[in-house]
Image: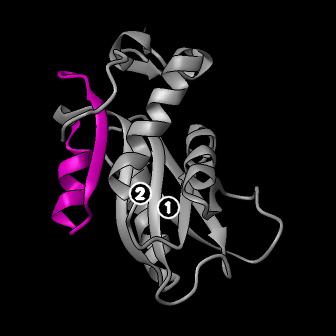
Amino acid sequence: MEKRNLTDLKTMIRAIPDYPKPGIVFRDITTLIADRKGLRASVDELIWPFLSGDIDYVAGIEARGFILGGAVAHELGLGFVPIRKKGKLPWRTIGKEYSLEYGVDTIEIHADAISKGDKVLLIDDLIATGGTADAAIDLIRESGGEMVAAAFVVDLPDLGGSRKLKDRGVRVHTLVEFEGD
């Protein structure tokens, strides 16, 4: 997808080798979102394909997806649905266990956060193997929501997450790719 903004987002993302375990190169967007031009460009490019879309909610995955998803929801004039790690939400929840490249975890949403037919845009900082996003999509769909798309700043295409979501019929929008990670 063509990007409108000339800010080089890729150069603003820090690579941290062997984190959280040996052999993993962690792509840290905290350096990107700390830069006012980087944050603005990221949010602008995340929302661009959805400006005229039929969307009811933006959902963001803890924790960096909260930062980006909140900003995207604000810019689109929509409500925000947090997708949190197990035990962090104060009301009745539904949850989904998933595997990631370095372990297993569970995410949850409030049982009443999304209603049947609500159209949802999912936001997170990065897609790697797709485990977290895949589980989030399951939660959205189990709630009766319809997936409009999933959008990420970073794609690690060699790990197959974007392909996994596309194979499930989810439109995927990413801003930068890092091959081989």
The correct choice, above or below, for 169 with respect to 62 in the image is: below
Quarter of the rendering containing residue 9: top left
Which numbered tag is attached to residue 172?
none
> On the rendered structure, is 43 left or right of 81?
left
Q: Nearer the viewer, mark 1 or mark 2?
A: 2
Residue at screen point 34% across, 15% down = 8
> On the rendered structure, is 63 left or right of 10?
right
**Magenta stretch containing residue 162, yes or no?**
yes
- Indicate the secondary structure of the residue bearing disc 2: loop
Disc 1 from disc 2: Cα separation: 32 Å
Residue labelled with disc 1 = 97
Residue nearest the viewer, comparing 127 with 103: 127
| Percent coordinates x, y for residue 51 in the rendering | 41, 57
The correct choice, above or below, for 5 with respect to 128 in the image is: above
> On the rendered structure, is 167 left or right of 11?
left
Residue labelled with disc 2 = 51
Dot 1 or dot 2: first in sequence order is 2
Q: Could you tell me if residue 126 is visible in this image?
A: no
Q: In what quadrant of the picture does the C terminus appear?
A: top left
Q: Amino acid at mark 2?
A: Leu
The range drawn in magenta is 159-181
| Percent coordinates x, y for residue 179 in the rendering | 18, 22
- Indicate the secondary structure of the residue bearing disc 1: strand
The correct choice, above or below, for 42 with respect to 28 in the image is: below
**Magenta stretch containing residue 71, yes or no?**
no
